[in-house]
Image (spheres, rainbow, N blue to C red):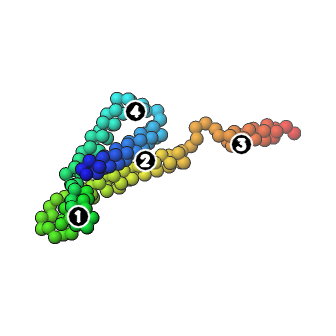
Amino acid sequence: CKLAPFVQILSVDVSIYSLVAVSLDRYHVMLHPLKPKLSTKSAFIIFVIIWLIALGSSTPSLFFFNIHAMDNVGYQCLPVSPEQLMGTNTTTNSYDIYKIYVVYNIYSQYIIPFIIISCAYFRIASHLYFSKPVGQTKHQEVIARNKRKVSMTGFWP
């Protein structure tokens, strides 16, 4: 019961944080193409940091989830006791901490990564859309060729 939520939150965290790292790497490569790329050692350090943050973020789930006996249903794996869920228990300290943990997970797994990834890809898209092409495009070459033809024929009577 304790292991399943832990692994679930761990895998989501690692996936989300890896997506954030990939988007930031693409941002760096696209906007600064001449600067050195990420080295293997730096990538490994980022990989280890992602796993450590994900482990730290998912560890509280090991303390919150327990097996509880339900009257009509049998046994269920719940984050807090059924009394705390119904509000009949006066000591709701662990339930309040669990609510804070849920809000933390919403921010760390969805809101903050969404903002970072969206900003990175928006900056990449705007950089590509508004930047001038390097060298001449085919359309520009045709226009330049036609201008040369007109200017050369203009000198002859």
In the image, 82 versus 74, the foreground residue is: 74
Q: Which amino acid does label 4 sit on?
A: Leu
Q: Label 1 neighbourhood size at 10 Å, few (<14), some (14-19), many (20+)?
A: few
Q: What residue type is labelled 1?
A: Met
Mark linked to residue 70: 1
Foreground tag (3 vs 2)? 2
The image quadrant where one finds the C terminus is top right
Q: Residue at x 32, y 49 (%)?
A: 8
Q: Label 2 neighbourhood size at 10 Å, few (<14), some (14-19), many (20+)?
A: some
Residue 3 in sight from this viewpoint? yes
Residue 57 in sight from this viewpoint? no
Instruction: Give the CA separation, mark 4 to mark 3.
Output: 41 Å
> For the image shown, how many numbered marks are present on the structure?
4
Instruction: Give the CA separation, mark 2 to mark 1.
Output: 47 Å
Question: What residue is shown with label 2?
Answer: 120
| Marked residue nearer the N-terminal end (3 or 2) | 2
Mark linked to residue 95: none
Q: Residue at x 42, y 32 (%)?
A: 37
In the image, 152 versus 5, the foreground residue is: 5
Q: Residue at x 82, y 39 (%)?
A: 153
Q: Which residue is drawn at 21% across and 55% down?
A: 66
| Marked residue nearer the N-terminal end (4 or 3) | 4
Mark linked to residue 38: 4
Where residue 104 appears, x then y in whole percent? 27, 55
Where residue 138 appears, x then y in whole percent? 68, 40
Instruction: Give the CA separation, mark 1 to mark 3.
Output: 79 Å
